[in-house]
Image (spheres, rainbow, N blue to C red):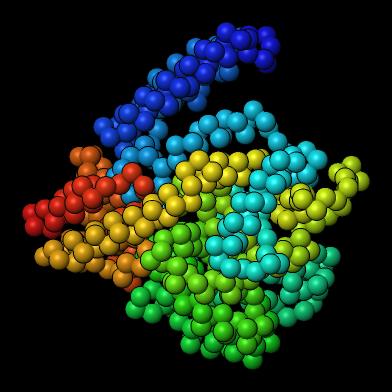
Amino acid sequence: MNTLVLSPAERSQAAAALASFVDSYEESLPTRPILPDVDRDTLTKLLAEPFPTEGIGVEGFFADLRDRIVPNSTAIAHPRFLAYVQGPPNGIAPYADAIAAVLNQNCNFWQLSPAASVVERSVVEWLAGLFNLGPESGGILTNGGSGATRDAITTALADRRPDFRERGLQSGAPPLVLYTSEEAHRCVDKAAATLGIGLDHVRHLPVDDEFRLRVDLLADAIAADRAAGLEPFCVVATAGTVTSGSIDPIGPIADLCAREDLWLHVDGAYGALFVLADSAQETFAPLSRADSIALDPHKMLFTPLEAGALVVKDAAKLRAAFAFSSSYLTVAEDDLMFDFMDYGPQLSRSFKALKVWAALRTFGVDTFRTAAERCLRLAARLAERIAAEPGLTLLNPVALTAVCVRIDGRRDEEYPALLAQLVDEGTALLGPARLRGQTAIRACVANYRTTDADIDLIADRLATLANC
């Protein structure tokens, strides 16, 4: 191949091969191993072999896919892939991703991506509307929840210190302090480290019996830091902690932040989109008081990686943190379209919004409401089975879909082998967990393919392990 354009025959060949691959992969999921039996020789050769001088063509590429890539890939879409907060991609996603690649819109300023700008704006406005953030709200799609949390803290810094963009943290003002719980995602620490706040200025506060941030200790820590001459500026609460799925008391935290003039960011990457479920809407209603919320459409909207989102109560503050001017990127402002390069750190940005928009348009919002409700119900079913089974101990109140179980009498060092056994025998891919110093097995139901039968299979097998 000496051209970068496929011929009509090659396009037909590639389209047929792709359709065949999607169909065969979908049909194979119930019997496909969750974790591959990794062929190390094949992967070693894949790493070592040079790229060819003359291309292998469409047929060669799909042969590589069939023979070397797929057999050594984790089956994320398997109905008993329950180790992580990562669900299978929705059915329209492969096609939306392919179309985005064909269009190859650069979603930085609107002239390069007019329709994409409007599509992203519509997705962001819908996400912000789920939490009633108000008429001044806005946001941007990101690569994930970690990036959204980092960008939210950046916005909080710029809001706290008007000269932050010019002077950073070198102004000689008192050190800034950020507060979160000991159960918070490590992206908070990563953001503090990379933004220059420093880990010494992150307070990881104890949690209550339900693994939620203790507001009384938060208030004490803020007072102590003020007395020590430090400057509290931000609280990161969590709506769905990664281990137990616990939801911090957002309302009382918002009250405290209002009194203390602190930015309230909510890491809702795991849990906040469960607001789609009717049964969870009251739980998430206090998020309307947040200054910013991190979301992950690549979790509960089942969008393929990568697709995170940051929504903020005041979009002007987001723009103030990130907007810079460049003469070569200047175009006339348009009331309909946004220059999303002014709302985040990236300049070149892919058309992530298309796969989110396509899924909402193709399946309808009610389909996602049903999927969210179903995941909550299945997690509750698993928790009930575990709580009723002699020899098994449920370690966490199941606020969302994370279920942590300890097998009585098993030593901590036995759990890795137990998890491996569950995978090897085809029961499920579950994950490790540690809560209050106790090692456990964690199932996280974030998979629309999971059924009652899958849950019962897992519960029955755990019960057998507890009694053998």
Q: In this rendering, would 281 be left or right of 8?
A: left
Residue depicted at 56% across the width and 80% down the height:
254
**Position of 396 relative to 151 (above/below):** below
For the view shown, which residue lies furthest in the right direction?
327
Q: Is residue 165 visible?
A: yes
Q: Is 300 in front, or is 208? A: 300
Q: Position of residue 20 (x, y in %)?
A: 42, 20
Write down the quadrant of residue 12 in the picture: top right
Foreground of the two, 26 or 148: 26
At 44% across and 52% down in the image, what residue appears?
366
For the view shown, which residue lies furthest in the left direction?
A: 468
Left or right for 79, reference 61: left
Quarter of the rendering occupied by the C terminus: bottom left
Q: Residue at x 67, y 31 (%)?
A: 103
Is 108 situated above or below 197?
A: above
Residue 327 position within the rendered picture, expressed as x and y whole percent measured from the top left? 91, 46
